[in-house]
Amino acid sequence: MSSTTHTERTAAQSRSPTLHPVTLTTITTPNPTIRILTLRTQHPITFLPGQWLDVHIPSLPKPGGFTITSTPTASSVAGGHIELAVQASDNPPAAWLWRREEQILGSQLRVRVGGDFVWPREGIQRALFVAGGVGINPLISMLAHVVETETPLEALDFMYTTKAPPPGSQILFLSRLLGLRARRPDLRVHLFLTSPAPPLDHGPDIAVHTRRLTSSDFAEVLGASGPHTTAFVCGPPDMTDDAVEQLRDRTGAVHCEKWW
């Protein structure tokens, strides 16, 4: 884990001046290391797909930074919600959000929108998303927004590399990816499992590989249309650096964010 705080790492990025009150209403745990939290909003909160929240917890001196995994529509009305996926960590804000559910449900928090790694409003012909582990968080918001708004694209690919979860657990947001694929037939999903995995009930609509993502996979997905493709990459630093290096000369543009 990085020794710098979220606030220090993101000091140069865009931040809203407004702190919004929210209430922690639900917690689900798809696997042993991830909690998905729902924050009920008191009034509309505007953000762009891919942005994060400064989450201010009353008992802690510094906010934590957690990426929004819902779409802007969900928080666009009073009484809406924002969803976060929080990895278990000894970082104080994350550790607080991993307390026993009965200790924190109903808690009042304050949040501020920030971040520059966002889905553009226009100008994308072909889109490629590349997610490593919990780096899927901003990308699932972007992809869901594309599907929800029926954004026209010539091609749409989602490459997701992650470890297989323990038996009885779920791969983070895999079921959501399948649901989005069902709503958007031109979406191609490519799953790369970097550890041994039991059989997955993923249906015929996604390609599953039990190995690491390689440069030849990028070449196959992009084909001859790379120069017209915009790539969005998020994952651990080493994975992100490698993917950006592979994609820089193969795509029209690459945008990235590292998951620390």
Image: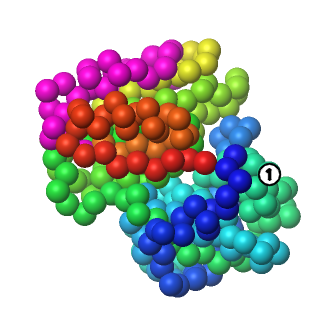
* Horizontal relation, residue 62 to residue 231: left or right: right
Residue picked out by circle 1: 90
Q: Nearer the viewer, residue 186 or 141?
A: 141
Question: Percent position (x, y) of residue 137?
Answer: 51, 49
Dividing the picture into quarters, in which one does residue 254 lie?
top left
Q: Is residue 104 above or below residue 232?
A: below
Is 225 covered by the magenta stretch?
yes
Q: Residues within 10 Å of mark 1 (few under 14, many from 20)?
A: few
Q: Number of numbered discs present? A: 1
Q: Residue at x 51, y 47 (%)?
A: 258
Is 50 covered by the magenta stretch?
no
Q: Residue at x 44, y 32 (%)?
A: 242
Q: Nearer the viewer, residue 14 or 98?
A: 14
Q: Amino acid at mark 1?
A: Asp
* Horizontal relation, residue 180 to residue 126: left or right: right
Q: Nearer the viewer, residue 181 or 235?
A: 235
Let me know if residue 256 appears in the view.
yes
Dividing the picture into quarters, in which one does residue 205 lie?
top left
Residue range (magenta): 201-230
Dividing the picture into quarters, in which one does residue 83 lie?
bottom right
Color style of the picture = rainbow
Let me know if residue 155 appears in the view.
no
